[in-house]
Image (cartoon, rainbow, N blue to C red):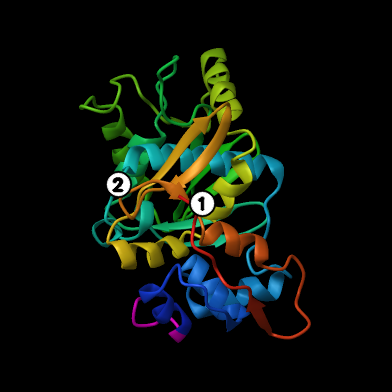
C-alpha cells in the first residue's frame, strides 16, 4: 500500500500515532494497513479466514520470531524510505501455515547476511534455516516454519547467499545459509536451542509484529527511522521500540494485535479502543 493509497484514518494516525483517539475502520482497510497488501490480495485472504490477521501455529510462530530477531539485530536503526520498507519488507501476506513477504529488490543481500548462521556462543543468524527455490519464489524453512520470499529470483538469492559468506566488519567469514538438501548438524541445533530459549515468551509478540509489519511504516512516517531492540531484564525478554530515539515498550502494534478479534465480527465494521501513550 503506497502513501497515497493509505486510507484517511492511516494518514491521520501518521501525525498523531500515539494520541488516544477511537476510530471505526473496515476490516479491509485494517488488514491493508497492517500488511501493505494490495486490495485484491487482502480481499482474497479475508474471504479465506475469519481473522483480520491469522494466528500461526507454534512452530511457525517460533520460527518467525527467530527470523525477526535476526533482522532486528542486523538492520538496527534504519530508514525504511531507503530500504523499501521496514526491514526491507514492502508487504506481507500472513497465513496460518506460512508468511509471504515481498522484499524490496535490493534487500535480499541484507536478508541473507542477517539470516546466515555462524554457530558458537557469540554466533548470529538463524541456525537450521534452509532455503529452496519454488517457481518464482524463495522458500525459507525451519522446523515447521515457512516464509516465502515472493518474486525473488533464484540467481539473485544465490548471489545474496554467496555474499553473505564474505567477511566484513559485522559478519563472520564462516557464516552461511544452506539449501534444503543440507542436513542440520549438532552445532546448529545447539545454537538454535540457545536462541529459542532466549526468545521464549516473546515469540507471540515478535511474530505478531512481523505479521503486521505495515504498522511500522506508520512509525517511520512519524520518526523517519525504525529501531527495535530485543533485550532481557531479570531473565525476561522484552521487545522495545527505540524509533523515537529512546527505548520504550511498544504501544501501537502490540495493543492493536490483541484487540483485533479472532472471529468474524457481526458487521463489516470494527471499533478499536483508544491507544494509550507507552510507559517509559
- Relative image position of residue 274 (x, y in whole percent): 58, 73
- Relative image position of residue 185 (x, y in whole percent): 55, 16
Residue lying at 60% horizontally and 41% vertically, measured from the top left: 203
Q: Is residue 74 above or below residue 192?
A: below
Q: Is residue 231 above or below residue 111?
A: above
Check residue 110 for magenta coloring.
no
Per the image, the residue denoted by label 1 is 148
Look at the image and give the residue range highlighted in magenta.
Answer: 2-8
Decide which of 261, 112 is in the foreground and name it: 261
Q: Answer whether residue 92 is visible to the viewer in this image.
A: yes
Check residue 3 for magenta coloring.
yes
- Relative image position of residue 268 (x, y in whole percent): 69, 85
Q: Main secondary structure of the magenta part?
A: loop
In the picture provided, is 261 more to the left or to the right than 2? right
Disc 2, SS? loop
Per the image, the residue denoted by label 2 is 77
Frontmost of labels 1 and 2 is: 2
Amino acid at each position: 500500500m503506497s502513501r497515497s493509497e493509505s486510507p484517511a484514518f492511516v494518514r491521520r494516525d501518521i501525525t498523531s500515532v500515539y494520541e488516544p483517539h477511537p476510530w471505526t475502520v473496515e476490516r479491509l482497510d485494517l488488514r491493508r494497513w497492517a500488511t501493505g497488501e494490495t486490495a485484491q490480495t487482502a480481499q482474497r485472504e479475508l474471504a479465506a479466514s475469519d481473522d483480520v490477521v491469522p494466528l500461526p501455529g507454534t512452530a511457525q510462530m517460533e520460527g518467525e520470531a527467530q527470523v525477526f530477531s535476526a533482522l532486528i539485530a542486523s538492520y538496527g536503526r534504519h530508514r525504511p524510505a531507503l530500504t523499501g520498507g521496514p526491514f526491507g519488507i514492502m508487504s506481507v501476506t500472513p497465513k496460518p501455515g506460512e508468511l509471504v513477504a515481498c522484499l524490496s529488490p535490493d534487500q535480499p543481500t541484507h536478508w541473507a547476511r542477517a539470516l546466515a548462521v555462524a554457530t558458537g556462543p557469540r554466533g548470529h543468524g538463524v541456525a537450521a534455516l534452509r532455503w529452496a527455490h519454488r517457481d518464482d519464489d524463495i522458500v525459507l524453512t525451519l522446523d515447521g516454519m515457512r516464509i516465502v520470499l515472493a518474486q525473488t529470483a533464484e540467481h539473485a538469492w544465490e548471489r545474496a547467499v554467496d555474499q553473505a559468506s564474505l567477511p566484513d566488519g559485522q559478519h563472520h567469514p564462516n557464516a552461511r545459509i544452506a539449501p534444503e538438501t543440507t542436513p542440520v548438524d549438532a552445532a546448529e541445533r545447539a545454537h538454535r536451542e540457545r536462541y529459542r530459549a532466549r526468545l521464549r515468551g516473546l515469540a507471540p509478540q515478535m511474530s505478531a509484529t512481523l505479521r503486521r509489519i505495515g504498522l511500522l511504516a506508520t512509525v517511520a512516517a512519524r520518526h523517519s527511522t525504525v529501531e527495535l531492540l530485543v533485550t532481557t531484564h531479570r531473565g525476561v525478554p522484552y521487545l522495545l521500540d527505540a524509533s523515537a530515539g529512546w527505548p520504550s515498550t511498544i504501544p501501537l502494534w502490540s495493543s492493536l494485535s490483541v484487540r483485533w478479534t479472532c472471529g468474524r465480527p457481526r458487521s463489516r465494521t470494527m471499533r478499536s479502543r483508544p491507544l494509550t501513550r507507552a510507559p517509559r
